[in-house]
């Protein structure tokens, strides 16, 4: 395969391309068999398999243990998930392994179904996602490779509410999401004021962009917010939740981002791992955006990756939009620079409680959830989650990977003292010991 | 839904009915020929080779082999080094490449190795025409090529396997100006644009030489009074008639390894997974059988470093042979990849595995004493027999590692469906078939190292010629139908036609069967063997919230296999 007759990728890049041609949510759903057909066809026709330093790997199957490290599944992961979900998550694990074991410098999991709307508690499918494949990958990396500081930059058009939820109280995970303003798009969240849990204030940064934001707007956010914050946070790993539905042809969103824009964003971000999220312009966008992202990651020339109807003069932001995004950038920067603002509460070992209502749009039901953060001066503290919905209940305790021994034993004690209740799952998720126990 | 069938495999079937066949395998230094009646070996002959006079070499072999009654001879099958030589000696004809790359990866890299003229315009992944190429650019390219004295051109567009219109348009526009015109879509229906470009380039580069060769050979055949059809062996273990090979000379490359694999099959019938080894003086070629059928490359063979779509058996060549130079280094043997003349037993200067075989009495060539010296040169303090045993064990271990790597590589090939991922099967060899000079001596070592029975078939020295003789015609064709667009493409026969919106998979099968039947008839075969359909993919195209059509893809092939028993 090695020859000077094919281009050479300066960064060795692993692709886990798994279009799952035999899986769909339902035949006419955006998340259907056809979704990655044209992407597959484009990538194969380009001859990427023969480019020196681009490697193709099949996904592996994630285990239920990998899922339970992150999620609190109701009634259980085994009952909620199909093999397709384990393969999609397994695709991200394969990507992680490729990078962590230095088979490649970069990896891109082009897999489906996506995951960034899946929260820590899982009662079913929401926003086309059941399990959060990035989060599963992040905790897998921490477990197996001892990595601590990780940045997730979510470039999907929809707010990555699931990923935000899972890492909300973790100051070692920087979560930045740029997306179409939640007032105009599912899931209706991701506002500036959502800045992280009490132990991780400022480590969640939301950038809700106005509808019709163009390349210029995304470039500005990257240059003024994302890159400066990353420089300061100094993550050991950067992950891009690479949704591609900001594209101007996407049927379910309203943005004006291009394949060139996506490629440029990834060249600047220089992520270690990309994970495909949404993107439903399957014919006019995905073949080009995916190719652009791959070439950008691999350090190759992407200047000729253009949509057939691309016209650089077509999408120009009006001055008032430029000013709006400029102001937004300033506010988003302030979120991060004001990080760690609630240390006092931790010093006083307070319990901080959040309530929320989570809507499962695919089948249409609500879950009421109450999260109590048991704060600690030594660590982010353990959290206690009570959730009810769909006639099911869970009461769970999560010790984060960076939890201290004291919080770990406290969570264990509280859990062991609870009596099992019929119709309710009581769970202990201890990421330090890597155990998941239910009763 | 898609039903994935592993298309890299074929199944061998045996048919009755052919008469006598002469098989010829031209190698680097010598050429072998056999005369077969069914599977009965009636005659064999060996001559040394002058690569400049290949047709003479072949005619000499034929003189020795052709039966007195010429009418009994039904075919001649030829595996030659013509194309390999042209590549090695740099005597390829210059080709002007007209390339339409459309959006995507920067195509400038093609210009590093071919004379390239880029066209504008584009076709997309569904075979839809985005923009036609500018005729002025085509004409300017043609003028420039003619000025450079280019006689052979190659025309390739991205996605031409989905829509050949631009390739045809360019060819029509330039018709009559160049001696040879090769078009990408005719060479393969598979995706992979760079491979299509290099395959087309190679085809163009071989056209003149192949025609000269054909004329010389036909003249010789006439002299000998031979009128039966002459076929050439391809890299995929099948044959095509000379007439087709003239149009697609690129298909005749890399036939040596496929002759060897088909020879192994002919000499030892296999139905399980197996490892085939052709152990020579400098290299060992490894091939794998799955359920008795040889494994194919997913796209095609690499020729002179260039990836192509020329369908080929999957073979791995490692620099390990009887005459490989051996050194003792940090407690292990380093065998090959280079060789330094012959074994010490035969007067060479460096120890070789052949010396070890001589020491152990497994080979009786050269001097036993010098072979012993070779072992002592490696390990002065050990008994030569002991060193020789260790050396051959190490040789077998090298082969085991290469086989394992190859099996892993095949297992890791990308799959695209949940069903295919969950049902992947790893090749589990039950048998080794080894041929080549050192094979017999290595038999017990291979068997022990790979924990498998190892056979060395009789007449293996003419395995390649037998393989060439016993191989049969192969053809493949690819169909892409888009009922939403009402279009069907079978690139291999330049077919681009309208279809009704109710076109179904059974229609696709019928259309593809007709295509294959036509190709077979054009190749002068009266009956068409059974056709395999592979890689069925049927996908609903949903726009808005309703189905606007279907995309159907399908491949068909005549299984490569052995003729006649």
Image (cartoon, coloured by chain):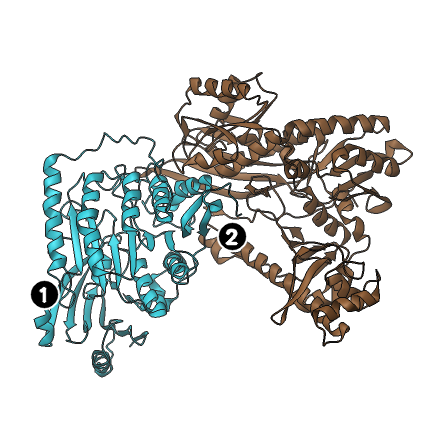
Chain colours: A cyan, B brown
Residue linked to disc 2: B413
Q: Nearer the viewer, residue B10 or A333?
A: A333
Q: In this rendering, would A268 be left or right of A352?
A: right
Rendered residue at 18%/41% (across/down) = A217
Label 2 environment density (alpha carbons within 10 Å; few <14, some 14–19, many ≥20): few
Q: Quadrant of residue B325?
A: bottom right
Residue B336 placement (x, y as % from top left): 66, 58
Residue A365 visible in image = no
Q: Quadrant of residue A246?
A: top left
Residue A436 placement (x, y as % from top left): 31, 74
Label 1 environment density (alpha carbons within 10 Å; few <14, some 14–19, many ≥20): few
Label 1: element kind = loop
Q: CA distance from mark 2 to mark 1?
A: 51 Å
In the rendered image of this protein, does residue A97 appear above or below residue B132? below
Residue A339 placement (x, y as % from top left): 13, 62
Residue linked to disc 1: A341
Q: Nearer the viewer, residue B371 or B141?
A: B371
> Numbered disc 2: what chain?
B
Residue A415 visible in image = yes
Residue B140 placement (x, y as % from top left): 46, 18
Q: In this rendering, would B124 be left or right of B189?
A: left
> Numbered disc 1: what chain?
A
Label 2: element kind = loop
Rendered residue at 26%/57% (across/down) = A152
Rendered residue at 48%/55% (across/down) = B421
How many numbered circles are shown?
2
Say the numbered circle drawn on residue B502: none
């Amino acid at each position: 395969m090695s020859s000077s007759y094919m281009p050479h990728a300066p960064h060795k890049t692993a692709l886990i391309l798994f279009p799952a041609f035999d899986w769909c949510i339902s035949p006419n759903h955006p998340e259907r068999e056809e979704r990655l057909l044209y992407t597959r066809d484009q990538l194969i026709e380009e001859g990427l398999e023969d480019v020196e330093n681009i490697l193709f790997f099949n996904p592996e199957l994630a285990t239920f243990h990998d899922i339970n490290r992150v999620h609190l599944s109701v009634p259980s992961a085994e009952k909620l998930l199909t093999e397709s979900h384990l393969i999609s998550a397994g695709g991200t694990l394969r990507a992680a392994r490729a990078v962590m074991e230095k088979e490649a410098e970069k990896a891109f999991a082009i897999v489906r179904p996506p995951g960034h709307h899946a929260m820590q508690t899982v009662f079913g499918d929401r926003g086309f996602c059941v399990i959060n494949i990035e989060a599963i990958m992040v905790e897998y990396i921490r477990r197996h490779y001892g990595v601590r500081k990780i940045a997730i930059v979510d470039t999907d058009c929809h707010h990555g509410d699931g990923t935000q939820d899972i890492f909300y109280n973790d100051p070692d995970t920087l979560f930045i999401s740029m997306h179409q303003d939640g007032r105009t798009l599912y899931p209706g969240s991701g506002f500036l004021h959502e800045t992280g849990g009490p132990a991780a204030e400022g480590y969640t940064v939301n950038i809700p962009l106005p509808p019709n934001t163009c390349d210029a707007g995304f470039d500005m956010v990257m240059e003024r917010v994302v890159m400066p914050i990353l420089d300061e946070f100094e993550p050991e790993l950067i992950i891009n939740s690479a949704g591609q539905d900001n594209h101007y042809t996407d049927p379910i969103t309203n943005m004006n981002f291009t394949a060139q824009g996506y490629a440029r964003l990834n060249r600047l971000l220089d992520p270690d791992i990309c994970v495909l999220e949404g993107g439903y312009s399957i014919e006019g966008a995905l073949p080009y955006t995916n190719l652009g992202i791959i070439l950008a990651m691999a350090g190759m020339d992407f200047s000729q990756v253009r949509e057939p109807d691309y016209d650089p003069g077509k999408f120009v932001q009006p001055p008032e939009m430029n000013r709006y995004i400029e102001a937004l950038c300033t506010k988003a920067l302030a979120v991060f620079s004001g990080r760690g603002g609630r240390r006092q509460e931790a010093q006083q070992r307070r319990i901080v409680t959040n309530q929320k209502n989570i809507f499962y749009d695919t089948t249409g039901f609500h879950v009421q959830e109450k999260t109590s953060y048991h704060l600690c001066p030594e660590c982010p503290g353990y959290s206690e989650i009570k959730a009810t919905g769909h006639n099911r209940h869970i009461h769970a305790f999560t010790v984060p990977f960076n939890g201290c021994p004291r919080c770990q034993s406290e969570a264990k004690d509280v859990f062991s003292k609870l009596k099992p209740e019929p119709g309710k799952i009581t769970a202990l998720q201890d990421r330090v010991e890597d155990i998941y126990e239910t009763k | 839904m898609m039903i994935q069938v592993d298309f890299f495999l074929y199944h061998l079937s045996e048919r009755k009915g052919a008469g006598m066949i002469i098989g010829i395998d031209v190698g680097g230094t010598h050429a072998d020929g056999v005369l077969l009646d069914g599977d009965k070996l009636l005659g064999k002959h060996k001559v040394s080779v002058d690569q400049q006079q290949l047709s003479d070499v072949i005619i000499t072999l034929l003189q020795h082999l052709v039966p007195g009654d010429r009418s009994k001879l039904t075919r001649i099958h030829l595996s030659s080094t013509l194309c390999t030589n042209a590549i090695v000696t740099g005597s390829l004809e210059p080709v002007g490449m007209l390339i339409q790359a459309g959006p995507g990866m920067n195509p400038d890299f093609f210009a590093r190795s071919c004379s390239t003229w880029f066209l504008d315009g584009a076709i997309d992944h569904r075979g839809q025409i985005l923009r036609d190429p500018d005729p002025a650019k085509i004409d300017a390219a043609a003028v420039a090529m003619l000025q450079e004295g280019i006689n052979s051109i190659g025309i390739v567009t991205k996605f031409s396997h989905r829509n050949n219109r631009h390739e045809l348009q360019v060819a029509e526009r330039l018709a009559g100006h160049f001696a040879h015109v090769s078009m990408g879509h005719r060479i393969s229906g598979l995706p992979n644009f760079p491979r299509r470009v290099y395959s087309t380039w190679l085809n163009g580069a071989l056209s003149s030489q192949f025609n000269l060769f054909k004329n010389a050979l036909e003249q010789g055949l006439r002299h000998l009074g031979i009128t039966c059809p002459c076929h050439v062996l391809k890299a995929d273990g099948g044959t095509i008639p000379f007439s087709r090979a003239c149009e697609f000379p690129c298909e005749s490359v890399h036939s040596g390894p496929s002759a060897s694999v088909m020879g192994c099959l002919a000499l030892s019938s296999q139905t399980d997974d197996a490892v085939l080894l052709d152990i020579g003086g400098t290299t060992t070629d490894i091939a794998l059988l799955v359920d008795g059928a040889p494994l194919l490359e997913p796209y095609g063979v690499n020729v002179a470093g260039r990836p192509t779509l020329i369908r080929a058996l999957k073979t791995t060549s490692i620099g390990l042979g009887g005459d490989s130079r051996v050194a003792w280094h940090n407690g292990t043997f380093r065998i090959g990849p280079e060789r330094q003349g012959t074994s010490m037993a035969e007067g060479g200067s460096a120890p070789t595995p052949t010396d070890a075989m001589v020491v152990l009495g497994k080979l009786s060539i050269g001097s036993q004493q010098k072979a012993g010296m070779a072992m002592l040169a490696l390990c002065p303090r050990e008994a030569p027999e002991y060193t020789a045993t260790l050396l051959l064990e190490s040789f077998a271990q090298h082969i085991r590692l290469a086989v394992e790597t190859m099996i892993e590589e095949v297992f890791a090939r990308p799959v695209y469906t949940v069903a295919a991922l969950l049902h992947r099967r790893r090749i589990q060899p039950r048998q080794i078939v080894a041929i080549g000079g050192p094979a017999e001596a290595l038999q017990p070592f291979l068997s022990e190292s790979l924990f498998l029975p190892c056979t060395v078939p009789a007449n293996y020295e003419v395995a390649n010629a037998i393989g060439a003789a016993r191989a049969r015609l192969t053809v493949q064709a690819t169909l892409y139908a888009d009922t939403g667009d009402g279009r069907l493409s079978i690139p291999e026969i330049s077919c681009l036609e309208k279809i009704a919106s109710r076109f179904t998979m059974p229609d696709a099968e019928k259309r593809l069967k007709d295509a294959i039947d036509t190709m077979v008839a054009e190749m002068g075969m009266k009956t068409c063997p059974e056709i395999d359909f592979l890689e069925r993919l049927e996908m609903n195209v949903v726009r808005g919230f309703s189905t606007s059509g279907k995309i159907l893809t399908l491949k068909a092939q005549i299984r490569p296999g052995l003729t006649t028993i």
